[in-house]
Image (spheres, grey):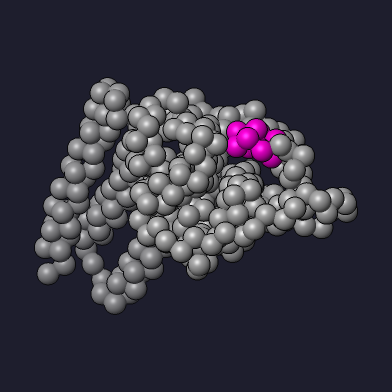
Amino acid sequence: MVKPKSLITDVPVAAEAREALLERLFASQLPHNGELFVPGDDFYGHQSPREQAGHMLVQLCTWLGIKPGYIALEIENSDRDVPASRYRIYIDQSSLINEFVLAAVLAHALCRYLLEERKQIRLPLPDQQAALLTTATVLFGLGLVISNGMVPGHAWLPNGRVKKSTLTTLLPDIPTEQYTHLLKGFLRRYDIPLSVYAFALAPWTAHRLKVPLPHHTTKVVAAAKHRVLMERMKLAGVAWLLFVSLGIGSFVLFQRAKPFSPQFKAANDQVSLLAQLIQTCESQVAYDRQYTDTSDIQSQRVVQAEDNRCQSLHNQYDSAVAHRDSLAH
């Protein structure tokens, strides 16, 4: 017997209205009401991407109350036959490159299955359906998995080959800020403590939620944090080399245009050195503020001392510039 397709004409505009609609339609069947799925090392695993996808699927299905046998993964360029009787989740090859993206794609697709196949929920417009689906992923406890999968488009992604279109199709027309707002609201609403999920936050999710990453994290999160750190160091190194190159080039041109006294040269060198020290100091303070536990008073004092040192360098730089300029006249 084919289930009749339902069309809900009373469109829930606000997030609260969408949550109320989902709670009413799922009633006692609402998966893990008020609980958060926290992905650990046993979730991300260390298998090949295709095995990992199957491993994640089983855990997510169990969490959502779906029998894994109902779902079939259809992976791009795979020779595996997919039974026509199962609900198919299509996995793009680019999603296999990053564990966070892969998990988010699966979680999003399973929530779509619950809404559109099991409950036959259809809203009049695609953007309304997408908003309802987005709310469902948070309400069903998968907000952390989805947020971790909303990786920023930077070079620290593995192999740098994740397509930008992957996340566009994952959460169509839903800004990252709006999704983060939904996730924050869920965590506050059910009073879920930071200690429950902090170790499983990807660096970008921790930044969005404005919480510090703990020292002990899952292996995949630790690896992502290391990639972020290495990329930032590399970018800082490139910026420093560019700054030095421009400084040297400008100095050479200036030197050719007009000869200066040894005193002026020494003063100019002092200005350049202080500028480099300020840049290094401010980069360190910015990094420490992002990853230092706000409850650790001693660590906060260290950060404050470093910030004071940066201010002192700024004062020295201003004095050095004024001294150099006075020698130029």
How far across and how far down the image is residue 74, in percent? 77, 53
Q: In the image shown, does 236 or 201 lie closer to the viewer?
A: 201
Tell me, yes or no, whether the highlighted magenta stretch contains residue 61: yes
What secondary structure is the magenta-colored segment mainly?
Answer: helix
Determine if residue 157 is in view: no
In the rendered image, the residue lying farthest to the front is 1
In the picture, which quadrant includes the C terminus? bottom left
Q: Residue at x 37, y 52 (%)?
A: 17
In the image, residue 245 sits, relative to residue 71, either above or below, namely below
Q: Is residue 233 above or below residue 65?
A: below
Q: Is residue 204 left or right of residue 161?
A: left
Residue at the spot 25% in from the left edge and 58% down from the top edge: 268
> Relative to residue 241, is residue 301 depicted above or below?
above
Question: In the image, is residue 272 part of the stretch drawn in magenta?
Answer: no
Q: Name the side, left or right, on which 133 lies relative to 68.
A: left
Can residue 64 be seen here? yes
- Comparing 300 with 4, the one in front is 4
Residue ID at (44%, 49%): 21
Whether residue 49 sits left or right of residue 288 in the image: it is right
Total residue callouts: 0
Name which quarter of the figure residue 10 lies in: bottom left
- Name the residue: 16% across, 67% down: 328
Q: Residue 215 sits in which quadrant?
A: top left
Residue 288 percent location from the top left of the image = 35, 36
Per the rendered image, the range of residues in magenta is 57-66
Q: Position of residue 197 (x, y in %)?
A: 46, 30
